[in-house]
Image (cartoon, grey):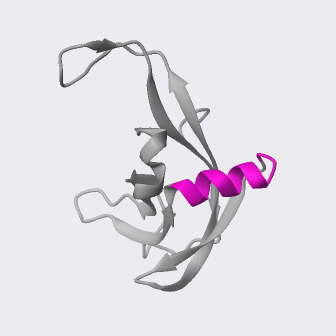
Amino acid sequence: MPGSGDMKIPINAGTLDQHRVAIRVMDYDWGKKDDLLGEILVDANALVQQQAAGGGAPLTFNLMNKGKQGKGTITLSVSILNIQLPMIQPDGQIAASAQVLFIKCHNAQGLKSGDWIGKNDVYIQVGV
């Protein structure tokens, strides 16, 4: 669905080099624990710089599983966006804009099977 792979994570671009981003490809299992199909762990600053160095072309990564080469790939675009949202700061002031790390997942391919029967119900988790 359009926009379903778009993730916006509030972040301060000035501290981008202090953050690592975990991106996990998961299989939804109704009534059970969801299956991890693969993941990547990358430095947020390096991710943004790599995207810019590639002229904005999407980045493709091999997925890992438990620290070892896994099955499948994930293709992403990454940028820093300034968005206009009224946000109350800790000091009570209202900020008119905020920065977000914008990650767009274009696709995840060649994934291992998470189900014995049927197809994977794939979703993406992102954490900073």
Q: Is residue 48 magenta?
A: yes
Quarter containing the N terminus: top right
At 76% from the left and 54% from the top, the residue drawn is 53
In this view of the protein, which residue sits in the foreground, 21 or 16? Answer: 16
Image location of residue 64, percent across then percent down:
51, 78
Tell how many labels.
Answer: 0
The residue sitting at the left extreme is 91
For the point 61% across and 51% down, which residue is it? 48
Residue 12 rendering spot, x and y as whole percentages: 42, 38
Camera-side residue of 104 and 108: 104
Residue with the most extreme right position: 55
Residue 126 image position (x, y, % from top left) = 42, 53
- In this rendering, the answer to whether 5 lies above or below 19 is above
Locate residue 127, reporting x and y percent: 37, 54
Q: Quadrant of residue 50?
A: bottom right
Magenta segment's dominant SS is helix
Residue 55 in the image: above or below residue 64: above
Seen from the viewer's position, the closer of residues 110 and 106 is 106
* Lateral position of residue 31 relative to residue 45, left or right: left
For the magenta stretch, what is the residue range?
A: 45-56
Q: Is residue 80 visible?
A: yes
Q: Is residue 19 visible?
A: no
In the image, is 122 to the left or to the right of 72? left
Residue at 78% across, 50% down = 57
Is residue 61 found inside the magenta-colored segment of the image? no
